[in-house]
Amino acid sequence: MENLRQRRAKNPCSLLLSFVLITALSSSISATSPLPRSDQGTEQHASSPEHDKPHVHEVHCSRERSRAAWKVIEEYLMPFVEREKYELPRQCRLHPSNDIFRDQEEHKIHLDVNEWKCGYCRKSFRAEKFLDQHFDNRHSNLLDVSHSKCLADVCGALHCDLVMEFKSKKAKCNPAAAARNRHLCEGLADSCFPANKSPSSTRLHELFLRQFCDAHTCSGGRKPFSRGGKKHINRFYLAASVLTLMLLPLFYLIVYLYQREMKKGTQELRRITKVGRKAKPS
Ligand SMILES: [Zn+2]
């Protein structure tokens, strides 16, 4: 009985103790529970598109126009530069190191019409524009914006609009803009191909003026890229010529066999007629 009473007497105490313990525990749980929740929050935030927005560098250079400028350089200038075995000086704005997007562009892997791959992290994309977005979001820290110039800035001189996928409607020629582009163009010729540096530099200087700068006029008549560009081998013509080369021997073989058969036929006919003549007198 004594024991029981003691237990009963203890019971309120233990109840109070357990209450305190439970409240203490629950408060500690509630104090720790926001942590994982906030962790989840940041994780969700990390995968949300808002977090993907570039925050490291603010790039004020059009990737699309830079790409168009590079396309023009590759197509209408480099074939001549390579032929002359000329090396562009680094201060030339057309030098690859002056295109901030060059490294990223070279890390594009085009596997199929609808398959593009990031060369840095191997992620796949359905279209080039998604890969561009991925570069902006994930690899913008790789852009060297410290000293590089924006290649898109020389688009006016290089007639980028002519190679852009979505060509803008031809606007009325603006004499002031034409003069400005011509000035920019001639500046490029001077810095990239100094006139008296070497014979090849002089030749390329001349070519650059004809190829790009002459057309910056409102008087008309002059077309850009007058000296031509890279020669493209048309796949269709290539396939057609290979097929022709393969079928030609077959054709001759058929003609040869046919003629041989014809000859045999006439010889036999002659023999028959000879035999016929010999048989008559007897
Ligand atoms: Zn990547």
Image (cartoon, rainbow, N blue to C red):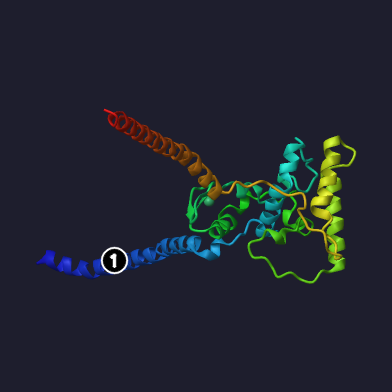
Q: Where is residue 30? Give x, y as percent.
A: 39, 66
Quarter containing the N terminus? bottom left
Residue closest to the far right: 196
Name the residue: 38% across, 35% down: 266
Please determine whether, in this image, residue 93 is positioned above or below residue 129.
above
In the image, residue 272 above or below residue 212: above
Residue furthest to the front in view is 281
Residue 138 rendering spot, x and y as whole percentages: 56, 54
Residue 223 lies in quadrant: bottom right
Identify which residue is drawn at 20% across, 69% down.
9
Q: Badge 1: few (under 14), some or many (20 or more) residues near its Cα, within 10 Å? A: few
Q: Is residue 243 left or right of residue 163?
A: left
For the residue marked with disc 1, what is the amino acid? Leu
Residue at screen point 43% across, 62% down: 40
Q: Residue at x 70, y 60 (%)?
A: 162
Total marks drawn?
Answer: 1
Relative vertical location of residue 79 with respect to residue 167 in this rendering, above or below: above
Left or right of residue 263: residue 196: right
Q: Nearer the viewer, residue 91 or 281?
A: 281
Residue closer to the observer: 177 or 266: 266
Label 1 CB sits under 8 Å from any ligand 1 atom: no
Give the structural element (helix, strand or loop) at label 1: helix
Identify residue for label 1: 17
Q: Residue 3 in the image: x percent, y percent?
A: 12, 64
Q: Is residue 227 visible?
A: yes
Q: Position of residue 35 (x, y in %)?
A: 44, 61
Instruction: Report whether residue 109 is seen.
Output: no
Image side of residue 51 versus residue 214, left or right:
left
Nearer the observer, 208 or 190: 208
Image quadrant where one finds the C terminus: top left
Q: Is residue 217 left or right of residue 122?
A: right
